[in-house]
Amino acid sequence: MLRITMSIPQTARVSQPSPSRIAIVGGGFTGAIIAYHLVNRSHHSVDEITVFEPRTDLGAGLAYSTNDPALRLNVAAYRMRAVPGDPGAFAQWLQATGRLSLDTQSISRGGTFARRRDFGAFMAERLSPLTESGQIRHVVEKVTSMDRASGEWRLVGSGGSVVTADLVVIATGHAPPRVPDQVPAHLVRAGRCLPATRLDAASDTIRTDERILVVGAGLTALDVVASLQARQHKGTISILSRTGLLPRPHADGDFSPFGRFDDSPATARGLLRKVRSLIAEVTEDGLPWQSVMDALRHQGQAIWAGLPRQEKRRVLRHLRRWYEVHRFRMPPQIEALLATAAEASAINFLSGRLKRVVEQGQNLAVEISTGNPARTCRLDVDRIITATGPDQANLLDYQPFLKSLRDAGTLTPDGLGLGIPCDDQCRAIASNGHPQASLLIAGPLTRGTFGEITGVPEIAAQAGLIVDTILRWTASQTRTIEIRGRAAAGIIG
Protein backbone atom coordinates (compact mmCIF):
# COMPACT_ATOMS: atom_id res chain seq x y z
CA MET A 1 0.00 0.00 0.00
CA LEU A 2 1.43 3.32 -1.07
CA ARG A 3 0.43 6.57 0.52
CA ILE A 4 1.07 9.69 -1.54
CA THR A 5 0.21 13.34 -1.22
CA MET A 6 -0.94 15.16 -4.34
CA SER A 7 -1.37 18.90 -4.88
CA ILE A 8 -4.98 19.48 -5.89
CA PRO A 9 -6.10 23.10 -6.18
CA GLN A 10 -9.50 23.70 -4.65
CA THR A 11 -11.67 26.78 -4.80
CA ALA A 12 -14.34 27.81 -2.35
CA ARG A 13 -16.78 30.49 -3.38
CA VAL A 14 -18.32 32.66 -0.69
CA SER A 15 -20.92 35.27 -1.58
CA GLN A 16 -21.25 38.36 0.58
CA PRO A 17 -23.40 41.45 0.17
CA SER A 18 -21.56 44.41 -1.31
CA PRO A 19 -21.45 47.62 0.71
CA SER A 20 -24.62 49.60 0.02
CA ARG A 21 -24.71 53.34 0.59
CA ILE A 22 -28.09 55.00 0.07
CA ALA A 23 -28.46 58.75 -0.45
CA ILE A 24 -31.84 60.48 -0.33
CA VAL A 25 -32.12 63.96 -1.82
CA GLY A 26 -34.86 65.76 0.10
CA GLY A 27 -35.82 65.27 3.72
CA GLY A 28 -39.44 66.37 3.74
CA PHE A 29 -42.11 63.81 4.54
CA THR A 30 -41.32 61.68 1.47
CA GLY A 31 -37.57 61.39 1.96
CA ALA A 32 -37.87 61.06 5.73
CA ILE A 33 -40.40 58.23 5.69
CA ILE A 34 -38.25 56.32 3.17
CA ALA A 35 -35.24 56.69 5.48
CA TYR A 36 -37.41 55.64 8.43
CA HIS A 37 -38.53 52.51 6.53
CA LEU A 38 -34.95 51.69 5.57
CA VAL A 39 -33.66 51.82 9.13
CA ASN A 40 -36.42 49.53 10.34
CA ARG A 41 -36.34 47.03 7.49
CA SER A 42 -32.83 46.82 6.08
CA HIS A 43 -31.46 44.57 8.87
CA HIS A 44 -27.84 45.59 8.22
CA SER A 45 -28.09 45.10 4.43
CA VAL A 46 -27.67 48.89 4.09
CA ASP A 47 -24.41 50.34 5.37
CA GLU A 48 -25.15 54.06 5.15
CA ILE A 49 -28.30 56.16 4.86
CA THR A 50 -27.65 59.82 4.06
CA VAL A 51 -30.38 62.42 3.68
CA PHE A 52 -29.69 65.83 2.14
CA GLU A 53 -32.15 68.33 3.63
CA PRO A 54 -31.32 72.02 4.26
CA ARG A 55 -33.88 72.34 7.08
CA THR A 56 -32.72 71.46 10.58
CA ASP A 57 -35.42 68.81 11.08
CA LEU A 58 -36.29 65.85 8.92
CA GLY A 59 -39.87 65.03 8.00
CA ALA A 60 -41.41 68.50 7.76
CA GLY A 61 -40.29 69.87 4.40
CA LEU A 62 -41.93 72.96 2.95
CA ALA A 63 -45.47 71.82 3.73
CA TYR A 64 -45.08 71.19 7.46
CA SER A 65 -42.14 73.38 8.50
CA THR A 66 -44.21 76.56 8.70
CA ASN A 67 -44.44 78.44 12.00
CA ASP A 68 -47.73 80.03 10.99
CA PRO A 69 -50.40 78.77 13.42
CA ALA A 70 -53.16 79.70 10.97
CA LEU A 71 -52.14 76.98 8.52
CA ARG A 72 -53.90 73.68 9.10
CA LEU A 73 -53.97 70.21 7.62
CA ASN A 74 -56.81 69.80 5.15
CA VAL A 75 -57.62 66.28 6.40
CA ALA A 76 -58.53 65.04 9.88
CA ALA A 77 -55.66 63.85 12.07
CA TYR A 78 -56.85 60.25 12.11
CA ARG A 79 -56.47 60.14 8.32
CA MET A 80 -52.78 61.15 8.48
CA ARG A 81 -51.61 57.54 8.31
CA ALA A 82 -47.93 58.34 8.16
CA VAL A 83 -46.30 55.54 10.16
CA PRO A 84 -46.37 52.00 8.79
CA GLY A 85 -48.26 49.62 11.05
CA ASP A 86 -49.50 52.43 13.28
CA PRO A 87 -52.21 54.40 11.43
CA GLY A 88 -53.38 56.26 14.53
CA ALA A 89 -49.92 57.41 15.61
CA PHE A 90 -50.35 61.10 14.81
CA ALA A 91 -53.77 61.46 16.43
CA GLN A 92 -52.51 59.68 19.55
CA TRP A 93 -49.40 61.87 19.64
CA LEU A 94 -51.52 65.04 19.54
CA GLN A 95 -53.37 63.82 22.61
CA ALA A 96 -50.33 62.52 24.49
CA THR A 97 -48.23 65.67 24.00
CA GLY A 98 -50.99 68.04 25.07
CA ARG A 99 -51.00 69.85 21.74
CA LEU A 100 -54.65 69.03 21.25
CA SER A 101 -55.65 70.76 24.49
CA LEU A 102 -53.58 73.81 23.52
CA ASP A 103 -55.31 74.06 20.13
CA THR A 104 -59.00 73.70 20.87
CA GLN A 105 -59.88 75.32 17.54
CA SER A 106 -58.57 72.23 15.77
CA ILE A 107 -61.58 70.19 16.93
CA SER A 108 -64.55 70.58 14.62
CA ARG A 109 -67.12 68.57 12.77
CA GLY A 110 -65.44 65.84 10.79
CA GLY A 111 -62.59 65.39 13.23
CA THR A 112 -59.45 67.14 14.41
CA PHE A 113 -57.81 69.39 11.82
CA ALA A 114 -54.44 70.03 13.42
CA ARG A 115 -51.98 72.80 12.72
CA ARG A 116 -49.60 71.92 9.97
CA ARG A 117 -46.57 72.65 12.11
CA ASP A 118 -47.76 70.02 14.61
CA PHE A 119 -47.45 67.31 11.98
CA GLY A 120 -43.95 68.58 11.19
CA ALA A 121 -43.05 68.33 14.88
CA PHE A 122 -44.49 64.81 15.01
CA MET A 123 -42.32 63.66 12.11
CA ALA A 124 -39.22 65.38 13.51
CA GLU A 125 -39.73 63.57 16.82
CA ARG A 126 -39.90 60.24 14.98
CA LEU A 127 -36.72 60.89 13.01
CA SER A 128 -34.50 62.63 15.55
CA PRO A 129 -33.52 59.45 17.48
CA LEU A 130 -32.35 57.90 14.22
CA THR A 131 -30.18 60.88 13.33
CA GLU A 132 -28.81 61.17 16.87
CA SER A 133 -27.82 57.49 16.86
CA GLY A 134 -26.14 57.81 13.48
CA GLN A 135 -28.50 55.38 11.77
CA ILE A 136 -29.43 58.25 9.46
CA ARG A 137 -26.87 60.85 8.50
CA HIS A 138 -28.52 64.23 8.00
CA VAL A 139 -26.55 66.60 5.76
CA VAL A 140 -28.08 70.03 6.35
CA GLU A 141 -27.41 71.23 2.81
CA LYS A 142 -28.97 71.31 -0.64
CA VAL A 143 -27.52 69.12 -3.37
CA THR A 144 -25.85 71.36 -5.93
CA SER A 145 -24.38 68.72 -8.24
CA MET A 146 -24.70 65.01 -8.82
CA ASP A 147 -22.99 62.73 -11.32
CA ARG A 148 -22.13 59.09 -11.85
CA ALA A 149 -18.68 57.61 -12.41
CA SER A 150 -17.18 54.13 -11.92
CA GLY A 151 -20.52 52.73 -10.87
CA GLU A 152 -21.02 55.25 -8.05
CA TRP A 153 -23.02 58.43 -7.53
CA ARG A 154 -21.20 61.50 -6.29
CA LEU A 155 -23.31 64.19 -4.63
CA VAL A 156 -21.99 67.62 -3.63
CA GLY A 157 -23.84 69.79 -1.13
CA SER A 158 -24.17 73.56 -0.96
CA GLY A 159 -21.88 73.62 2.09
CA GLY A 160 -19.15 71.59 0.41
CA SER A 161 -20.09 68.12 1.70
CA VAL A 162 -19.31 65.30 -0.72
CA VAL A 163 -21.18 62.00 -0.42
CA THR A 164 -20.58 58.88 -2.50
CA ALA A 165 -23.55 56.54 -2.84
CA ASP A 166 -24.41 53.29 -4.58
CA LEU A 167 -28.10 54.17 -4.94
CA VAL A 168 -29.88 57.55 -4.86
CA VAL A 169 -33.52 58.42 -4.20
CA ILE A 170 -34.67 61.82 -5.49
CA ALA A 171 -37.44 63.09 -3.21
CA THR A 172 -37.26 66.85 -3.68
CA GLY A 173 -41.03 67.34 -3.71
CA HIS A 174 -42.95 69.96 -5.64
CA ALA A 175 -41.44 72.58 -7.90
CA PRO A 176 -42.01 76.23 -6.91
CA PRO A 177 -44.96 78.06 -8.48
CA ARG A 178 -44.34 79.81 -11.76
CA VAL A 179 -44.62 83.57 -11.82
CA PRO A 180 -47.24 84.55 -14.44
CA ASP A 181 -45.68 85.89 -17.63
CA GLN A 182 -47.89 88.98 -17.35
CA VAL A 183 -46.08 90.14 -14.18
CA PRO A 184 -42.99 92.30 -14.89
CA ALA A 185 -39.79 90.84 -13.44
CA HIS A 186 -38.93 94.00 -11.50
CA LEU A 187 -42.11 93.61 -9.42
CA VAL A 188 -40.89 90.18 -8.36
CA ARG A 189 -37.48 91.54 -7.44
CA ALA A 190 -39.09 94.34 -5.42
CA GLY A 191 -41.34 91.91 -3.54
CA ARG A 192 -44.56 93.44 -4.87
CA CYS A 193 -45.28 90.09 -6.46
CA LEU A 194 -44.26 87.15 -4.32
CA PRO A 195 -45.03 83.42 -4.20
CA ALA A 196 -47.28 82.16 -1.42
CA THR A 197 -44.38 80.09 -0.10
CA ARG A 198 -42.58 83.34 0.87
CA LEU A 199 -45.55 84.97 2.59
CA ASP A 200 -44.42 84.05 6.09
CA ALA A 201 -40.95 85.52 5.58
CA ALA A 202 -42.33 88.70 3.98
CA SER A 203 -45.24 89.26 6.38
CA ASP A 204 -43.52 92.14 8.20
CA THR A 205 -43.35 94.11 4.95
CA ILE A 206 -47.08 93.79 4.16
CA ARG A 207 -49.26 96.58 5.51
CA THR A 208 -52.57 95.52 7.02
CA ASP A 209 -54.47 97.88 4.70
CA GLU A 210 -52.95 96.60 1.46
CA ARG A 211 -55.22 95.52 -1.37
CA ILE A 212 -53.99 92.08 -2.34
CA LEU A 213 -54.63 89.97 -5.43
CA VAL A 214 -54.09 86.23 -4.96
CA VAL A 215 -53.60 84.44 -8.30
CA GLY A 216 -54.89 80.90 -7.93
CA ALA A 217 -57.81 79.48 -5.95
CA GLY A 218 -56.64 76.18 -4.51
CA LEU A 219 -55.75 75.27 -0.94
CA THR A 220 -52.58 77.38 -1.13
CA ALA A 221 -54.64 80.47 -1.94
CA LEU A 222 -56.90 79.74 1.02
CA ASP A 223 -53.81 79.39 3.20
CA VAL A 224 -52.85 82.92 2.14
CA VAL A 225 -56.26 84.22 3.21
CA ALA A 226 -56.04 82.43 6.57
CA SER A 227 -52.55 83.72 7.20
CA LEU A 228 -53.45 87.33 6.35
CA GLN A 229 -56.65 87.26 8.39
CA ALA A 230 -54.76 85.88 11.41
CA ARG A 231 -52.53 88.97 11.16
CA GLN A 232 -55.59 91.21 11.35
CA HIS A 233 -55.41 92.19 7.69
CA LYS A 234 -57.99 94.89 6.86
CA GLY A 235 -57.42 95.43 3.14
CA THR A 236 -59.50 93.75 0.45
CA ILE A 237 -58.29 90.35 -0.74
CA SER A 238 -59.23 89.29 -4.29
CA ILE A 239 -58.81 85.68 -5.43
CA LEU A 240 -58.47 85.15 -9.17
CA SER A 241 -58.69 81.82 -10.98
CA ARG A 242 -59.55 80.74 -14.49
CA THR A 243 -62.50 78.56 -13.46
CA GLY A 244 -63.67 80.32 -10.30
CA LEU A 245 -63.82 76.93 -8.59
CA LEU A 246 -62.86 76.71 -4.91
CA PRO A 247 -61.97 73.63 -2.86
CA ARG A 248 -65.13 71.99 -1.55
CA PRO A 249 -65.88 71.54 2.17
CA HIS A 250 -65.66 68.33 4.14
CA ALA A 251 -68.77 66.37 5.03
CA ASP A 252 -69.99 66.06 8.61
CA GLY A 253 -69.39 62.86 10.52
CA ASP A 254 -67.57 59.68 9.56
CA PHE A 255 -68.31 57.56 6.52
CA SER A 256 -66.69 54.88 4.37
CA PRO A 257 -65.57 55.23 0.74
CA PHE A 258 -68.27 54.17 -1.69
CA GLY A 259 -67.96 52.78 -5.22
CA ARG A 260 -65.88 50.57 -7.48
CA PHE A 261 -64.25 51.90 -10.63
CA ASP A 262 -62.66 48.73 -12.04
CA ASP A 263 -65.61 48.23 -14.39
CA SER A 264 -65.67 51.77 -15.79
CA PRO A 265 -64.49 52.43 -19.38
CA ALA A 266 -60.84 53.44 -19.69
CA THR A 267 -61.73 56.90 -20.96
CA ALA A 268 -62.08 60.34 -19.40
CA ARG A 269 -65.73 60.48 -20.45
CA GLY A 270 -66.45 57.02 -19.05
CA LEU A 271 -64.79 57.89 -15.75
CA LEU A 272 -66.87 61.07 -15.45
CA ARG A 273 -70.09 59.15 -16.14
CA LYS A 274 -69.18 56.59 -13.48
CA VAL A 275 -68.47 59.26 -10.86
CA ARG A 276 -71.77 61.04 -11.57
CA SER A 277 -73.70 57.77 -11.42
CA LEU A 278 -72.19 56.78 -8.08
CA ILE A 279 -72.76 60.24 -6.58
CA ALA A 280 -76.42 60.12 -7.64
CA GLU A 281 -76.74 56.68 -6.06
CA VAL A 282 -75.04 57.52 -2.78
CA THR A 283 -76.74 60.88 -2.21
CA GLU A 284 -80.14 59.29 -2.86
CA ASP A 285 -79.37 57.07 0.14
CA GLY A 286 -78.55 60.12 2.26
CA LEU A 287 -74.76 59.72 2.22
CA PRO A 288 -72.32 62.49 1.20
CA TRP A 289 -70.77 62.78 -2.24
CA GLN A 290 -67.39 62.91 -0.48
CA SER A 291 -67.63 59.12 0.04
CA VAL A 292 -67.44 58.60 -3.74
CA MET A 293 -64.49 60.95 -4.08
CA ASP A 294 -62.66 59.09 -1.30
CA ALA A 295 -63.21 55.81 -3.16
CA LEU A 296 -61.94 57.45 -6.35
CA ARG A 297 -58.86 58.60 -4.48
CA HIS A 298 -58.14 55.17 -2.99
CA GLN A 299 -58.44 53.52 -6.41
CA GLY A 300 -56.78 56.41 -8.22
CA GLN A 301 -53.48 54.72 -9.01
CA ALA A 302 -55.14 51.67 -10.57
CA ILE A 303 -57.50 53.90 -12.57
CA TRP A 304 -54.61 56.05 -13.81
CA ALA A 305 -52.54 53.02 -14.80
CA GLY A 306 -55.45 51.68 -16.88
CA LEU A 307 -55.95 54.85 -18.92
CA PRO A 308 -54.30 55.14 -22.35
CA ARG A 309 -51.94 58.09 -22.63
CA GLN A 310 -54.33 60.11 -24.75
CA GLU A 311 -57.09 59.63 -22.18
CA LYS A 312 -54.74 60.77 -19.42
CA ARG A 313 -54.25 63.97 -21.38
CA ARG A 314 -58.02 64.40 -21.63
CA VAL A 315 -58.38 63.90 -17.88
CA LEU A 316 -55.75 66.56 -17.26
CA ARG A 317 -57.28 68.96 -19.75
CA HIS A 318 -60.96 68.61 -18.88
CA LEU A 319 -61.33 66.97 -15.45
CA ARG A 320 -58.25 67.87 -13.47
CA ARG A 321 -59.56 71.06 -11.85
CA TRP A 322 -62.90 69.46 -11.02
CA TYR A 323 -61.13 66.53 -9.40
CA GLU A 324 -58.78 68.75 -7.41
CA VAL A 325 -61.50 70.91 -5.84
CA HIS A 326 -63.40 67.79 -4.74
CA ARG A 327 -60.32 65.81 -3.72
CA PHE A 328 -58.36 68.54 -1.87
CA ARG A 329 -61.09 69.84 0.41
CA MET A 330 -60.81 72.84 2.74
CA PRO A 331 -60.72 72.31 6.51
CA PRO A 332 -63.83 73.49 8.41
CA GLN A 333 -61.87 76.34 9.99
CA ILE A 334 -61.14 77.81 6.55
CA GLU A 335 -64.74 77.29 5.49
CA ALA A 336 -65.94 79.34 8.48
CA LEU A 337 -63.29 82.03 7.88
CA LEU A 338 -64.32 82.46 4.22
CA ALA A 339 -67.96 82.80 5.18
CA THR A 340 -67.15 85.52 7.71
CA ALA A 341 -64.85 87.36 5.28
CA ALA A 342 -67.44 87.24 2.51
CA GLU A 343 -70.12 88.69 4.80
CA ALA A 344 -67.79 91.56 5.67
CA SER A 345 -66.98 92.13 1.96
CA ALA A 346 -63.30 91.61 2.81
CA ILE A 347 -62.79 89.03 0.09
CA ASN A 348 -63.71 88.89 -3.62
CA PHE A 349 -63.71 85.87 -5.90
CA LEU A 350 -62.96 86.55 -9.55
CA SER A 351 -63.12 84.24 -12.55
CA GLY A 352 -60.87 85.11 -15.48
CA ARG A 353 -57.36 85.30 -16.83
CA LEU A 354 -54.58 87.66 -15.92
CA LYS A 355 -54.05 89.83 -18.99
CA ARG A 356 -51.62 92.55 -17.96
CA VAL A 357 -50.00 94.11 -14.89
CA VAL A 358 -48.78 97.71 -15.04
CA GLU A 359 -47.15 99.71 -12.26
CA GLN A 360 -48.83 103.11 -11.90
CA GLY A 361 -47.31 105.05 -9.03
CA GLN A 362 -48.12 103.22 -5.82
CA ASN A 363 -50.76 101.07 -7.55
CA LEU A 364 -50.54 97.94 -9.60
CA ALA A 365 -53.13 98.17 -12.36
CA VAL A 366 -54.23 94.61 -13.15
CA GLU A 367 -56.20 93.87 -16.29
CA ILE A 368 -58.31 90.72 -16.16
CA SER A 369 -59.98 89.06 -19.12
CA THR A 370 -63.36 87.62 -18.15
CA GLY A 371 -66.47 86.13 -19.69
CA ASN A 372 -67.38 84.66 -23.06
CA PRO A 373 -67.20 86.73 -25.18
CA ALA A 374 -64.20 88.11 -23.40
CA ARG A 375 -64.23 91.51 -21.80
CA THR A 376 -61.52 93.26 -19.78
CA CYS A 377 -61.92 94.64 -16.29
CA ARG A 378 -59.39 96.53 -14.20
CA LEU A 379 -58.41 95.95 -10.60
CA ASP A 380 -56.09 98.24 -8.61
CA VAL A 381 -54.03 96.43 -5.96
CA ASP A 382 -50.93 97.00 -3.86
CA ARG A 383 -49.46 93.51 -4.06
CA ILE A 384 -49.83 90.23 -5.96
CA ILE A 385 -49.35 86.83 -4.34
CA THR A 386 -49.03 83.81 -6.63
CA ALA A 387 -50.66 80.59 -5.50
CA THR A 388 -50.94 78.86 -8.85
CA GLY A 389 -49.54 75.51 -7.72
CA PRO A 390 -46.18 73.90 -8.47
CA ASP A 391 -44.68 74.22 -11.94
CA GLN A 392 -44.12 70.48 -12.33
CA ALA A 393 -43.89 70.72 -16.12
CA ASN A 394 -40.59 72.63 -15.78
CA LEU A 395 -39.39 70.87 -12.63
CA LEU A 396 -35.98 69.95 -14.05
CA ASP A 397 -35.13 73.61 -14.66
CA TYR A 398 -35.36 74.76 -11.04
CA GLN A 399 -32.45 72.93 -9.40
CA PRO A 400 -28.99 72.82 -11.00
CA PHE A 401 -28.36 69.16 -10.17
CA LEU A 402 -31.64 68.11 -11.80
CA LYS A 403 -30.89 70.22 -14.86
CA SER A 404 -27.45 68.62 -15.23
CA LEU A 405 -28.95 65.13 -14.93
CA ARG A 406 -31.44 66.03 -17.65
CA ASP A 407 -28.66 67.38 -19.88
CA ALA A 408 -26.75 64.11 -19.37
CA GLY A 409 -29.80 62.06 -20.36
CA THR A 410 -30.10 60.55 -16.90
CA LEU A 411 -33.49 62.19 -16.29
CA THR A 412 -36.12 63.17 -18.81
CA PRO A 413 -39.10 65.55 -18.65
CA ASP A 414 -42.50 63.99 -18.10
CA GLY A 415 -44.52 64.29 -21.30
CA LEU A 416 -47.67 64.90 -19.22
CA GLY A 417 -46.08 67.79 -17.34
CA LEU A 418 -46.45 66.09 -13.96
CA GLY A 419 -42.90 65.39 -12.79
CA ILE A 420 -40.13 62.90 -13.61
CA PRO A 421 -40.84 59.63 -15.50
CA CYS A 422 -40.22 56.38 -13.66
CA ASP A 423 -41.40 52.77 -13.93
CA ASP A 424 -43.80 51.00 -11.56
CA GLN A 425 -40.86 50.29 -9.21
CA CYS A 426 -40.01 54.02 -9.07
CA ARG A 427 -36.80 53.56 -11.10
CA ALA A 428 -35.97 56.67 -13.12
CA ILE A 429 -36.34 56.34 -16.88
CA ALA A 430 -33.28 57.55 -18.79
CA SER A 431 -33.40 59.22 -22.20
CA ASN A 432 -32.79 55.83 -23.83
CA GLY A 433 -36.07 54.61 -22.36
CA HIS A 434 -34.52 52.19 -19.87
CA PRO A 435 -35.07 52.23 -16.09
CA GLN A 436 -32.02 52.83 -13.88
CA ALA A 437 -31.75 50.42 -10.99
CA SER A 438 -29.63 52.74 -8.84
CA LEU A 439 -31.69 55.93 -9.29
CA LEU A 440 -35.21 56.11 -7.85
CA ILE A 441 -37.85 58.84 -7.89
CA ALA A 442 -40.24 59.35 -4.99
CA GLY A 443 -43.33 61.25 -3.91
CA PRO A 444 -45.20 63.88 -5.94
CA LEU A 445 -42.45 63.79 -8.58
CA THR A 446 -43.92 60.45 -9.73
CA ARG A 447 -47.44 61.70 -10.50
CA GLY A 448 -47.02 60.99 -14.20
CA THR A 449 -46.60 57.29 -13.43
CA PHE A 450 -48.92 56.85 -10.46
CA GLY A 451 -51.45 59.67 -10.75
CA GLU A 452 -52.69 59.90 -7.16
CA ILE A 453 -49.54 60.39 -5.05
CA THR A 454 -50.00 63.63 -3.11
CA GLY A 455 -51.48 62.67 0.25
CA VAL A 456 -49.55 61.32 3.23
CA PRO A 457 -51.15 57.82 3.12
CA GLU A 458 -50.29 57.37 -0.58
CA ILE A 459 -46.72 58.58 -0.11
CA ALA A 460 -46.25 56.35 2.94
CA ALA A 461 -47.42 53.35 0.92
CA GLN A 462 -45.08 54.27 -1.92
CA ALA A 463 -42.20 54.53 0.55
CA GLY A 464 -42.76 50.86 1.37
CA LEU A 465 -42.61 50.03 -2.34
CA ILE A 466 -39.38 52.00 -2.74
CA VAL A 467 -37.76 50.22 0.20
CA ASP A 468 -38.78 46.89 -1.36
CA THR A 469 -37.03 47.99 -4.56
CA ILE A 470 -33.92 49.06 -2.64
CA LEU A 471 -33.70 45.82 -0.66
CA ARG A 472 -34.07 43.71 -3.82
CA TRP A 473 -31.31 45.77 -5.38
CA THR A 474 -28.97 45.38 -2.40
CA ALA A 475 -29.61 41.63 -2.37
CA SER A 476 -28.56 41.42 -6.02
CA GLN A 477 -25.35 43.37 -5.40
CA THR A 478 -23.21 40.48 -4.12
CA ARG A 479 -19.48 39.88 -4.38
CA THR A 480 -17.90 36.45 -4.75
CA ILE A 481 -14.73 35.66 -2.80
CA GLU A 482 -12.60 32.79 -4.07
CA ILE A 483 -10.52 30.87 -1.51
CA ARG A 484 -7.80 28.70 -3.04
CA GLY A 485 -5.90 25.97 -1.14
CA ARG A 486 -4.04 22.64 -1.34
CA ALA A 487 -5.56 19.31 -0.44
CA ALA A 488 -3.84 16.15 0.76
CA ALA A 489 -5.33 13.07 -0.84
CA GLY A 490 -4.70 9.56 -1.66
CA ILE A 491 -3.96 6.10 -0.55
CA ILE A 492 -3.29 3.83 -3.45
CA GLY A 493 -3.32 0.17 -2.78
Image (cartoon, rainbow, N blue to C red):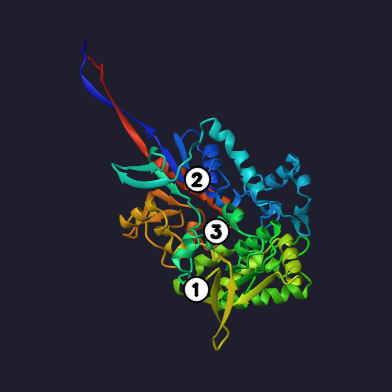
Residue in the image at 52% along x and 42% along y: 35
User: 323 or 337, which lies in front?
Assistant: 337
Tag 1 residue:
358
Q: Position of residue 93 (x, y in %)?
A: 71, 42
**Mark 2 belongs to which amino acid?**
Val
Q: Nearer the viewer, mark 3 or mark 2?
A: 3
**Mark 3 belongs to which amino acid?**
Ile
In space, the residues marked 2 and 1 are separated at their CA atoms by 51 Å
Residue in the image at 76% along x and 67% along y: 340
Tag 3 residue:
453
Tag 2 residue:
467
Classify 10 Å Cα crowding around label 1: few (below 14), some (14-19), many (20 and above): some
What kind of element bears circle 3? loop
In the rendered structure, the answer to whether residue 49 lies left or right of residue 252 reads left
Q: Position of residue 115 (x, y in %)?
A: 68, 51
Q: Position of residue 416 (x, y in %)?
A: 44, 68
**Mark 1 belongs to which amino acid?**
Val
User: 163 or 204, which lies in front?
Assistant: 204
* Quadrant containing the C terminus in the rendered view: top left
Q: Nearer the viewer, mark 3 or mark 1?
A: 1
In space, the residues marked 3 and 2 are separated at their CA atoms by 16 Å
In the image, residue 285 sits, relative to residue 472, either above or below, namely below
Q: Nearer the viewer, mark 2 or mark 1?
A: 1
Q: Position of residue 313 (x, y in %)?
A: 47, 73
* Label of residue 179 in the image: none
Residue in the image at 54% along x and 74% along y: 365
In the image, residue 272 sits, relative to residue 484, either above or below, namely below
In the figure, residue 243 lies in which quadrant?
bottom right
What kind of element bears circle 1? strand
In the figure, residue 98 lies in which quadrant?
top right
